[in-house]
Image (cartoon, grey):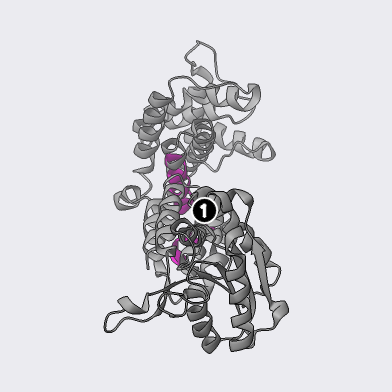
Amino acid sequence: MSCSILLSFVGHQDPYSEKTNQEGSIVSLAKFLVQQQPIKRVLLLYTGDFQQRAIDTKDWLGSELQIAEEAIHLEVVSRELSADPINPVIAVQEAKRALTLAKYHQTATDWLDLNGSSGTPVMKAAWSILQAIETRRRLRLWQVRNPQEIRPGQERVFAVDLNVFRQALDRQGIQQQLDSYDYQGAEISLKNSSIEAPLALALIRYGKYRLARNYHQAFDAINPYHTEIERLWFQEIAQLRQNNRHALFRDIYFQVVGLFTVGRYAEALILAMSLYENLLQYFVQEKVGLEVTTDARDRDQSLNLLQRHDQGRLWQYLRSYQRKNGDRLFLDTVTRELLLAVLQYDSQTMELAPHFQQIEAYYQQRNNVVHQLAGLAKVEDMQEEVLNALKQILSKVLPQEQLSLNPFKALNHLIAEHLSR
C-alpha cells in the first residue's frame, strides 16, 4: 500500500499561530495527507531556537493524528543554518540531507511529501529546488495557504508540480543529443528524467540500433508499438533487414551525412569509403553486367569474367590502362582501381567515373587514418566533395525524393513530437 513520508522545516507558526490560534502549515498538511493515505514517517527539521516548536508539533501529530512516536523524527539542522537561516545554499543542503534520511524508509510506492510553506523563505524554496532536480524519487511538493487569505474556489492545501520546468530543460538537452545523432545519450537522458514517453524511448532505441546497423534490434525496439507508430518506419527497417542494397546505400549515405554534420570526420570518411567500394561493385555488376567482386575467394572467377568480357576488348583496355602516376594496373587480383577502370571503359557508366575518382582521391587519407592513426586536413573541402560525389552516384540508383529526405532527421522530428505530448 502507498504511504506518505512527510518532510518539513519547523516554522514560527507550528504547530499553531500564537497570534491567531490558527493551525500551522505542518498540521494542515498532515491532516490533509492522512485523509488520502497513511503517514508512515514524519521528518521535522528545526533550527536551534525552534526546538520547543518541533517538540510541540510532534506531540500534536501523535495525539491528534495518532502517528506513532517512533515514526516522528526530529532533526536539528546544522549550526550554519541555525546561525544563518536565510542562506539558500545551506538550506538546500539540509533539505537534501533530509531526503537522504527519508529514502531509507521509502518503498517503491511511497511518496515523499514536502511542505513548501513552513520555515524561512529559503527553507520553503529549498524543497522546490529539490523537486526540480530530483527525478528518480516520488516527490510531491505542497503549499498551504494562509486561512485568512483564501479566496472563493481556492483550496487550503494544494500540490505544486515544478517538474514542468525540469522537463522542459530535459527535452532541450535530449533534442541537442538527437541533433548530434547521439541516440545512446538521449536514451540515458530520457530514462533519468521524469518524462513519461514510452514511444519516444522506443524510437530513440530504434535510432540507436539503426545507426549501429543492427537492424533486427531496431525492429524489436518498435515492434511492441506497431499499431501506434507509422508504417513507414517498419517498411524501411524491413528492407534493411532483408539487405536490400538500395535501402542500405541510402541508409549508409545519410549516416555519412550525419557523421560529417557533427564533425566526426574520420568516422565519416571511413564509412564513406566503405559505401564507395560497395557502389563500385554494384555498378560493375548491375550496369556493366560483370559479376565480379574484390573478394579474394572469387578471384579466379572474377578475372576470368573480365578477360572474356566484350570479346576480350575490356581486358586489352585494362592491360594498357595507365594510372595517374604512369604505372600499369595490377591485374593479378580485382582491386578498386581495376573496377574504376571498368567503369571508365563502359559507355553506360563512363559519366560516373569522375565522381568515383573524386572519392578515390581521398582513399589514401582513409588508409592513413586507419593504419597510421593520422589526422585529416582540409576537412570541410573533403566533406563537400565526398558528399557531392556520393549524391551524384546515388542519383543513378535512388529516386530523388529518397535522397532529399534524411530518415534520421525525420526520426528525430517524430521523437521530439512524442517527447512533447
Q: In the image, is residue 117 above or below residue 367?
A: below
Pick the quarter of the image with the C terminus.
bottom left
Which residue appears farthest toward the left when viewing the image?
152
Q: In this view, does 8 lie to the left or right of 180?
A: right
User: What amino acid type should be assigned to the residue bearing mark 1?
Assistant: Pro
Pick the quarter of the image with the N terminus.
bottom right
Residue 288 visible from this viewpoint: no
How many numbered discs? 1
**Residue 65 rendering spot, x and y as whole percentages:** 59, 87
Magenta-drawn stretch, dominant element (helix, strand or loop): helix
Residue 394 visible from this viewpoint: yes
Asked whether residue 255 is drawn in magenta, I would say yes
**Residue 226 rendering spot, x and y as whole percentages:** 47, 74
Mark 1 is surrounded, within 10 Å at the Cα level, by few (under 14), some (14 to 19) or many (20 or more) other residues, namely: some
- Magenta region, residue range: 233-257
Which residue appears farthest toward the right when viewing the image?
70
Q: Viewer-proximal residue, 171 or 128? A: 128
The residue labelled by disc 1 is: 85
Q: Viewer-proximal residue, 131 or 385? A: 131
Residue at 52% from the left image edge and 75% from the top image edge = 26
Residue at 49% from the left image edge and 77% from the top image edge = 16
Which residue appears farthest toward the front when viewing the image?
19
**Residue 28 rendering spot, x and y as whole percentages:** 48, 80
Per the image, label 1 sits on a secondary structure element best described as loop
Which residue appears farthest toward the top when viewing the image?
326
Q: In which quarter of the image is residue 52?
A: bottom right
Asked whether residue 292 is drawn in magenta, I would say no
